[in-house]
Image (cartoon, rainbow, N blue to C red):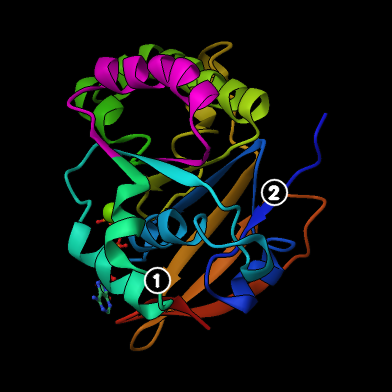
């Protein structure tokens, strides 16, 4: 087993909170309300994974599975410039795939098992993990079916992370209750539909101006507490 490797987020404070950055062989979930920076972080990581190792990257490429149509090449260009990288090269090393429904989303991940073998992909983003599943399986009456499929999807992603030594980063828009999806108490009462939760869960909250607050949830091996980072014109920073 190769050792775990890490990708910088662009913020030293956020990296420290994560124990050095986003890990390979692991699923990291960013969850929070709209506009908290989930998509911005995914864009930034797709750029940063390409950095050399001494700059916090893995010299690798990224796959960006976009379920909401919010991926922006212009934002990648800005972030590349912010790091002094050639935007065209950076864009060449990101495979953007638009997933049109949950079935397609899962089929894409299946296909990645072939693709990752042949290419130097070190990051797979799913932004958002949950939007299609929520739209297609609304309400409590569909909760069990939704959880079952999502579990299968997470399991697929976990295998991908472990087998190919890639970092898997997923987003999840939540309103007030962060546990509404993974640990819904009504689901636990209803039967064995408790979800296979991602390895590392990071809650994001808005703060003043361009600042955001990040907090790690349920990770015994990581420090407790919160940290502040910023989303600037050039991307994620301290
Ligand atoms: P949702 O749940 O709706 O998908 P999200 O958590 O993915 O939300 P993002 O799209 O990552 O939210 O964050 C959007 C915010 O990022 C904007 O409100 C703005 O504050 C900041 N942002 C986006 N682009 C820029 C930019 N070019 N320069 C500075 N800040 C930006
Ligand atoms: Mg988003």
Q: Quick check: is 76 in the magenta stretch?
A: no
Q: Is residue 35 visible?
A: no
Looking at the image, residue 191 lies above or below residue 92: above
Total labels: the figure holds: 2
Where is residue 217 shown, x and y percent of the image? 64, 53
Looking at the image, residue 202 lies above or below residue 129: below
- Between 191 and 167, the one nearer to me in the picture: 167
Residue ID for mark 1 = 85
Residue ID at (46%, 57%): 45
Residue ID at (36%, 18%): 106
Q: Circle 2 sits in a helix, a strand or a loop, which is it? A: loop
Where is residue 213 shown, x and y percent of the image? 50, 74
Residue ID at (42%, 14%): 110
Disc ID at residue 218: 2
Mark in front: 2 vs 1: 1
Where the N terminus falls, by quadrant?
A: top right
Disc ID at residue 62: none
**Residue 197 occupies which quadrant of the picture?**
top right
Dot placed on the residue nearer the N-terminal end, 2 or 1: 1
Q: Which residues are magenta?
A: 96-125
Looking at the image, residue 16 lies above or below residue 129: below
- Asked whether, in this view, residue 43 is left or right of residue 14, the answer is left
Query: How far apart in space, not on screen, are marks 2 and 1 (Cα)?
Result: 36 Å
Where is residue 27 shown, x and y percent of the image? 58, 38
Badge 2 density bin: few <14, some 14–19, many ≥20, Cα 10 Å: few
Q: Is residue 87 visible?
A: yes
Q: Quick one: which residue is furthest to the bottom in this view?
A: 209
- Between 32 and 116, the one nearer to me in the picture: 116
Where is residue 74 shown, x and y percent of the image? 18, 64
């Amino acid at each position: 087993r190769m050792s775990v490797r890490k990708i910088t987020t662009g913020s030293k404070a956020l990296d420290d909170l994560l124990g050095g950055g986003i890990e390979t062989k692991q699923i990291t979930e960013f969850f929070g309300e709209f506009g908290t920076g989930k998509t911005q972080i995914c864009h930034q990581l797709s750029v940063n994974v390409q950095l050399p190792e001494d700059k916090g990257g893995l010299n690798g490429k990224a796959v960006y599975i976009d379920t909401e149509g919010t991926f922006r090449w212009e934002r990648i260009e800005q972030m590349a410039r912010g790091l002094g990288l050639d935007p065209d090269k950076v864009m060449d090393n990101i495979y953007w795939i638009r997933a049109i429904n949950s079935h397609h989303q899962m089929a894409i991940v299946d296909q990645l098992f072939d693709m990752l073998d042949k290419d130097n992909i070190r990051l797979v983003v799913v932004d958002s993990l949950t939007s299609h599943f929520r739209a297609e399986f609304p309400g409590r009456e569909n909760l069990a079916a939704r959880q079952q499929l999502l579990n299968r999807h997470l399991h697929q992603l976990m295998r991908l992370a472990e087998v190919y030594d890639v970092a898997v980063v997923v987003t999840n828009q939540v309103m007030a209750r962060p546990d509404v999806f993974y640990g819904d108490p009504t689901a636990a009462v209803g039967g064995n539909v408790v979800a296979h939760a991602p390895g590392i869960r990071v809650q994001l909250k808005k703060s003043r101006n361009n600042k955001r607050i990040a907090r790690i949830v349920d990770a015994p091996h990581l420090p407790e507490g919160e940290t502040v980072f910023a989303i600037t014109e050039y991307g994620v920073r301290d």
